[in-house]
Image (cartoon, rainbow, N blue to C red):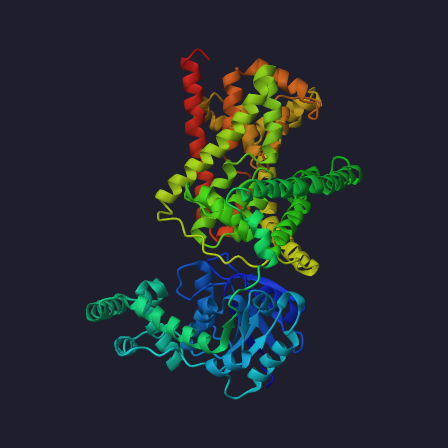
């Protein structure tokens, strides 16, 4: 190899062990990078045996390069726009026919390929014998058998990569032959200007683009790559082909690929007449059973949910105590009467805002560790399969169940958990409705308001009703979104059930630390900025000393908040708040609650000048004296539905890649909260309060 750095793309279907092999090849020295406009991840790392010469890029798992999903678009862009020096395709030896379909497309692109035949042990257990020498002869590219989870064949794969890169003519397979009608259609499109801007016009790449246009139409390459003339030419060729052959070109192209795959497998794959029943098959008789599998699945999800938040609670409280100690230390060492605004910024802005974010890190680390265990063990695919029937009825995907369940603990890790969903449409739908699930931060609000306004026999039913209301609204919102913005049939749940495996400690830790660092780095920066902005709103302008003279500390805090920009905004919004039964005091508390829902309770304590904010009894008494029960119900309803917290907004922005979706989430849910809360208040008024 010469002195330049070579790029090697790691491609393959989902659940074939790409990332496991990636970690073996790179020693887990990788970074996570988002491609522009999408949240689908790739990983990059240096080849351990040649760290200064070869970069390995782990692409999203995909079944094809048709550009229908984010995974397909990202993988296709990485291979076409940034053509690598070599593609290592990881194939599942237990289902070689499906995996070789992707191989045929790589050959059509004209890319050099090395085939890593993974899960050879599982194939043998299923009675599948692959003759690697015959397969290599049929495909014309190196074939390396591997067992990724045990590290077998990794050294041989490393050697094959370096040998292929050292060759002046890297190994390229022969594309599947096309019949005369297909060949004429592709040749016709090749003569049309289909080279992308900046492309060197390599013949193989041009033919691949022509083949893609013929298969999927001009829209497959996106609006930036197509003009009206090209689109008209593509549709004309597609119509002429269908008229000539009586079938669409996409079906004929797929048939040509599968015909070549069948020919290869007939010569290289042998199956025993009766494969023995594997351990995974025996486990699935219970865990994937249509009847018994559901309660087992619910028990597993409940155990995961409980473990994450119970085990995460002690370190979370420890972190909160450390931030409180830091705030106390700043107060004790700060010179009296000097730069008090800077002291407030550090304590009430930076420490309070960032501390609120970082205190969730233990929960998030445990959550992603649990997800990694479920995914690496093979159970997550079964969980999606079992919940798919229920979720499809409301327009969601089977994998959406897990983020919704996590949302009862905290919306932020629930949004991060939407990364397990395969399509952008499913991810966005789930993200947008997640704030309607009552998270743990709303429980302090319910704990304050329900005893304040409702007698003891009503308290448990009211708490249960709030949780049910959120679930019902989330279902309705999902139905509306899937019939409007995200119109279309739910994506079918296409997945292969991988065999059960024992998760590796290194894989779980890598997954956990990776996602935890992303949360701290990406969410923390934006939340810090929002925290400072909220601090400024609640701190300036400052109450003149003459106005605060003679007031007790609680009354002084209340007067200062009323005098601040947040208090003035609350008074300005009072005409909008009044139909819901709210006044400026509730409005001011809601502005502060944007930092975190539970802050609503502390802000009410400040507004009502309660001396001890930790003791809810005086605050309940003042709320009872100030408002009727219907206002208490309306406050809970609005805090359930409206104004998602800043952490939710920040993470939605990061995960969606655009401000459009958090703006829609915040504005839409707040408008819905206003409408429903106003309706409840007005109906209660007309029924006598």
Q: Relative to residue 588, is residue 203 depicted above or below? A: below
Q: Return the x and y of residue 29 as percentages of the image width and height.
A: 66, 67
Which quadrant holds residue 214? bottom left
Furthest toward the top, the residue is 688
Which of the image's four quarters has the N terminus? Answer: bottom right
Residue 81 visible in the shown view: no
Q: Return the x and y of residue 127 as percentages of the image width and height.
A: 55, 67
Q: In this image, 66 relative to 164: left or right?
A: left
Q: Relative to residue 552, is residue 341 depicted above or below? A: below
Q: In this image, 1 relative to 184: left or right?
A: right
Q: Return the x and y of residue 170 as percentages of the image width and height.
A: 51, 84
Of 264 and 537, nearer the camera is 264
Which quadrant holds residue 454? top right
Furthest toward the front, the residue is 273
- Callout count: 0
Which residue occupies 44% across, 68% down? 76
Q: Return the x and y of residue 97 as percentages of the image width and height.
A: 46, 69
Residue 560 visible in the shown view: yes
Which residue occupies 58% across, 82% down? 4
């Amino acid at each position: 190899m010469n002195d330049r750095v070579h790029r090697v793309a790691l491609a393959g279907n989902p659940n074939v062990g790409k990332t496991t092999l990636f970690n073996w090849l790179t020693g887990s020295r990788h970074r996570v990078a988002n491609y522009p406009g999408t949240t689908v991840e790739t990983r990059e790392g240096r080849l351990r045996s040649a760290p200064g010469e070869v970069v390995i890029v782990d692409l999203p798992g995909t079944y094809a390069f048709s550009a229908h999903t984010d995974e397909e678009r990202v993988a296709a862009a990485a291979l076409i726009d940034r053509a690598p020096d070599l593609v290592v395709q990881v194939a599942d030896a237990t289902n070689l026919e499906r995996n070789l379909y992707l191989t045929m497309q790589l050959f059509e692109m004209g890319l050099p390929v090395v085939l890593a035949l993974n899960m050879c042990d599982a194939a043998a257990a299923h009675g599948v014998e692959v003759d690697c020498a015959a397969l290599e002869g049929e495909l014309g590219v190196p074939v390396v058998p591997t067992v990724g989870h045990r590290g077998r064949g990794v050294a041989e794969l490393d050697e094959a990569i370096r040998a292929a890169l050292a060759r002046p003519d890297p190994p390229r397979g022969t594309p599947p032959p096309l019949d005369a009608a297909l060949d004429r259609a592709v040749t016709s499109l090749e003569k049309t200007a289909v080279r992308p801007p900046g492309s060197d016009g390599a013949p193989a790449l041009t033919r691949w683009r022509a083949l893609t246009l013929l298969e999927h139409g001009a829209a497959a390459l996106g609006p930036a790559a197509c003009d009206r003339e090209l689109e008209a030419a593509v549709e004309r060729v597609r119509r002429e082909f269908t008229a000539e052959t009586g079938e669409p070109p996409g079906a004929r192209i797929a048939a040509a690929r599968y015909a070549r795959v069948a020919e290869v497998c007939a010569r290289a794959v042998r199956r025993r007449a009766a494969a023995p029943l594997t351990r995974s098959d025996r486990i699935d008789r219970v865990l994937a059973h249509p009847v018994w599998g559901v309660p087992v699945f619910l028990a597993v999800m409940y155990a995961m949910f409980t473990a994450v938040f119970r085990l995460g609670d002690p370190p979370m409280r420890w972190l909160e105590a450390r931030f409180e100690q830091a705030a106390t230390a700043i107060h004790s060492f700060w010179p009296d009467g000097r730069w008090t605004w800077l002291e407030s910024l550090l304590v009430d802005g930076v420490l309070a805002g960032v501390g609120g974010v970082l205190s969730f890190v233990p929960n998030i680390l445990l959550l992603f560790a649990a997800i990694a265990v479920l995914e690496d063990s093979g159970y997550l695919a079964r969980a999606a399969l079992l919940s798919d029937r229920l979720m499809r009825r409301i327009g969601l995907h089977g994998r959406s169940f897990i983020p919704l369940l996590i949302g009862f603990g905290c919306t932020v890790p629930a949004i991060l958990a939407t990364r397990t969903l395969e399509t952008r449409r499913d991810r966005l739908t789930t993200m947008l409705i997640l704030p309607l699930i009552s998270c743990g931060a709303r429980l302090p609000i319910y704990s304050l308001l329900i005893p304040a306004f409702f007698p003891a026999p009503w308290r448990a039913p009211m708490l249960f009703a709030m949780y049910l209301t959120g679930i019902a609204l989330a279902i309705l919102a999902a139905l509306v979104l899937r019939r409007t913005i995200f119109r279309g049939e739910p994506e079918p749940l296409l997945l292969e059930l991988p065999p059960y495996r024992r998760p590796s400690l290194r894989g779980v830790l890598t997954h956990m630390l990776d996602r935890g660092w992303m949360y701290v780095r990406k969410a923390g920066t934006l939340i810090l900025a929002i925290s400072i902005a909220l601090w400024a709103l609640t701190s300036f302008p400052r109450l003149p000393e003459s106005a605060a003279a003679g007031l007790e500390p609680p009354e002084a805090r209340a007067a200062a908040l009323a005098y601040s920009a947040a208090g003035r905004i609350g008074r300005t919004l009072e005409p909008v708040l009044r139909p819901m039964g709210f006044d400026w005091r509730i409005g001011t508390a809601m502005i502060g609650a944007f930092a975190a829902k539970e802050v609503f309770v502390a802000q009410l304590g400040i507004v009502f000048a309660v001396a001890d904010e930790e003791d809810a009894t005086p605050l309940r008494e003042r709320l009872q004296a100030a408002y009727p029960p219907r206002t208490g119900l309306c406050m809970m309803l609005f805090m359930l539905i409206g104004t998602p917290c800043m952490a939710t907004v920040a993470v939605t922005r990061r995960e969606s890649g655009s401000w459009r979706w958090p703006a829609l989430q915040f504005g839409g849910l707040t408008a819905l909260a206003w409408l429903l809360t106003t309706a409840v208040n007005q109906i209660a008024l007309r029924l006598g309060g």
